[in-house]
């Protein structure tokens, strides 16, 4: 399959390109800079110059592909608008010739009551509330849309944990809330498998590791200093994303395992986070 993806040179994009190549796909990917293009070329993908606001480029690249994966995200006050316009351009270019895999995120579920699946009610924090409307548009567009909703991605030396949980490692509240984790290599494999999913499928990209924040912070600190913060203090330090880090979430990967044969292989997050 000829697969075009956005965000291919990013944290999740790089292992996704590798996973696609392992599955035998020919990969092209959006490159917003020369540096991104070099990364993609080294991974074995063909760079396509442009960014997420270049809808004509996205439409043309999708029209030349058999399948599309939308991983990239534009950051700014217009995040939701850019994401939707990009998705619509990609879906229009691809038409009904193949699967369009869209990226969501499990934070839209808000606090979960125990372990839940994709059909749980949604109650997102403000930082991710925009996703629901975009995802509904994507899934109702026609063609062959598929939604992958990653948990909190870790591993391979990057991601939100590396960015926001540096020394002194912050502990928000008492740390009894759970994070639904997934390793970057495992979520990459799910994206590759999602190209074979039925139309309008929705998958929680979580590994089944629902780990208390207190344990994660202890692993990250490795005996070093911990900054105990109230939620208000965490918001002041991190911004609105702190409200998402404070969510108590437990989700199951059962649907993706059952329907796609996805088998997460990284199941000891605390050991990996200890470095």
Image: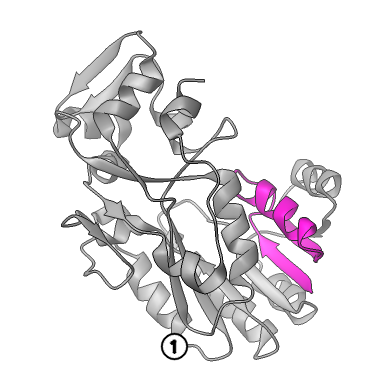
Is residue 20 in the magenta section? yes
Residue at the spot x=67%, y=47% of the render?
A: 15
**Residue 189 placement (x, y as % from top left):** 62, 56
User: In the drawing, does residue 79 fall left or right of residue 172?
Assistant: right
Q: In this view of the protein, which residue sits in the foreground, 58 or 248?
A: 248
Is residue 261 depicted above or below 264 in this figure? below
Magenta stretch?
A: 1-30
Is residue 44 depicted above or below 109 in this figure? above
**Residue 219 placement (x, y as % from top left):** 38, 21
Q: Quadrant of the N terminus?
A: bottom right
User: In the drawing, does residue 266 fall left or right of residue 230?
Assistant: right
Is residue 66 depicted above or below 154 in this figure? below
User: In the drawing, does residue 52 fall left or right of residue 259?
Assistant: right
Q: In this view of the protein, which residue sits in the foreground, 247 or 119?
A: 119
Q: Name the residue under label 1.
A: 140
Residue at the spot x=29%, y=40% of the render?
A: 245
> Which color scheme does this rendered protein use?
one colour
Residue at the spot x=76%, y=73% of the render?
A: 61
Q: In this view of the protein, which residue sits in the foreground, 127 or 118?
A: 118
């Amino acid at each position: 399959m000829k697969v075009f993806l956005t965000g291919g040179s990013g944290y999740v994009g790089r292992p996704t390109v590798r996973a696609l190549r392992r599955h035998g796909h020919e990969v092209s990917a959006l490159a917003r800079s020369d540096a991104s293009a070099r990364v993609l070329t080294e991974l074995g993908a063909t760079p396509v110059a442009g960014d997420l606001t270049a809808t004509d480029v996205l439409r043309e690249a999708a029209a030349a592909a058999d399948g599309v994966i939308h991983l990239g995200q534009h950051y700014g006050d217009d995040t939701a608008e850019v994401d939707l316009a990009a998705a619509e351009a990609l879906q229009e270019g691809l038409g009904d010739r193949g699967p369009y895999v869209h990226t969501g995120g499990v934070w839209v579920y808000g606090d979960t009551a125990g372990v839940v699946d994709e059909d749980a009610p949604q109650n997102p924090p403000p930082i991710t509330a925009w996703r629901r409307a975009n995802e509904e548009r994507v899934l109702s567009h026609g063609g062959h849309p598929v939604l992958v909703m990653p948990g909190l991605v870790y591993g391979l030396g990057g991601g939100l944990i590396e960015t926001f949980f540096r020394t002194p490692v912050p502990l928000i509240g008492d740390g009894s809330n759970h994070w639904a984790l997934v390793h970057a290599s495992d979520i990459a494999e799910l994206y590759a498998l999602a190209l074979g999913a039925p139309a309008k499928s929705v998958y929680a990209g979580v590994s089944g590791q629902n780990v208390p924040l207190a344990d994660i912070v202890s692993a990250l600190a490795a005996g070093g200093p911990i900054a105990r913060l109230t939620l208000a203090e965490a918001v002041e330090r991190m911004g609105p994303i702190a409200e998402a880090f404070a969510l108590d979430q437990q989700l199951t990967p059962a649907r993706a395992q059952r329907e796609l044969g996805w088998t997460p292989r990284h199941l000891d997050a605390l050991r990996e986070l200890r470095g």
